[in-house]
Every structure is written in C-alpha cells, then in structure tokens.
Amino acid sequence: GDLSQKMTVNVKGEILELKNILNQMVDSLNIFGDEVTRVAREVGTEGKLGGQANVPRVGGTWKELTDNVNTMASNLTLQVRDIANVATAVAKGDLTQKMTVNVNGEILDLKNILNQMVDSLNIFAGEVTRVA
C-alpha cells in the first residue's frame, strides 16, 4: 500500500522499460487513490454534489473502477437533487412535484414515501378547500 516508493536504480534495456512501466503504474495508482478519495470526501462527507474522479491514462480494471466511482457519485447526485427539488416544491406549496429519478433499494423506499406524502398533502389540501 505504500505508493511513495519508486524504482530508482540505474538500469538499461528491458529492465529500464520494466522500471519505467512500474513507476508509471505507481503514478497512476497515486492519482487514482487521490481522485477517489477526493470524490468520496466531496460527495460523501462535504455534501458537494456532482464530483467526478479524473484519472488520465488508465485502462482496464483501473478505468472500470474510476468509471464505477463516477457512476456512483453521479447517481447519488441525481437522487439527492431530485429529493431536494420535491422537498423545496412542497415547502413552497407546490404539490405537483414528485420524485421521478430511477432508483433501487432504500432510495426507492424513500422515493415512494416522499411521493405518498405529496399525495396525502394533496388530499388534505383538497379536503381543506372543500370544507372552507
């Protein structure tokens, strides 16, 4: 896990090529680790939605991991913003807004509850208007 070390020996030929590849791999892993940590901190801890990891010159598994981190951050951003839009609308008296983002699991439960709340408030508002 110590990515502060690089190969520094003087070598030639194929060993030099191997040394350069390993040192580039260490650089890429450092960038990957820094970027994933930054996105996790921004989105997960600081509440800064929309963060994306930028890891240049990676391929294979590292690109797939980077893409998955970015997809996760993007999905979370869309979900939270959809919740915020509905909550803001309800707070302003607009009972026409509902969550529309595609979600699964516990976020789907939250979506259903929030949308049911909007429906219940609409029924309540209709009854108050009818009685008044």
Image: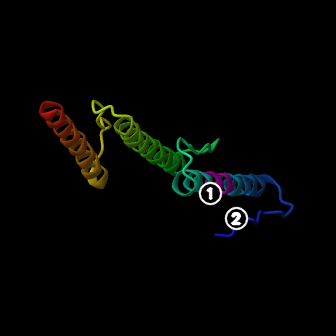
Residue located 41% across and 41% down the image:
84
User: In terms of secondary structure, where does tag 2 sit?
Assistant: loop
Q: Tell me if residue 32 is in the magenta stretch.
A: yes
| Residue of label 2 | 3
Q: Nearer the viewer, residue 68 or 116?
A: 116
Question: Percent from the top left, x then y, of residue 131?
Answer: 12, 34
Q: How is the image coloured?
A: rainbow
Q: Amino acid at mark 1?
A: Gly
* Within-10-Å neighbours for mark 1: few <14, some 14–19, many 20+: some
Q: Name the quarter where the C terminus is drawn.
A: top left
Q: Any mark on residue 33, and which?
A: 1
Q: Total marks drawn?
A: 2
Q: Amino acid at mark 2?
A: Leu
Q: Nearer the viewer, residue 131 or 76?
A: 131
Question: Percent from the top left, x then y, of residue 22?
Answer: 69, 57
Does label 2 or label 1 sit earlier along the sequence? 2
Find the magenta span and give its range: 30-35
Answer with the quarter of the image where residue 126 lies. Answer: top left
Query: Is there a contact, CB below 8 Å, between mark 2 and mark 1?
Result: yes
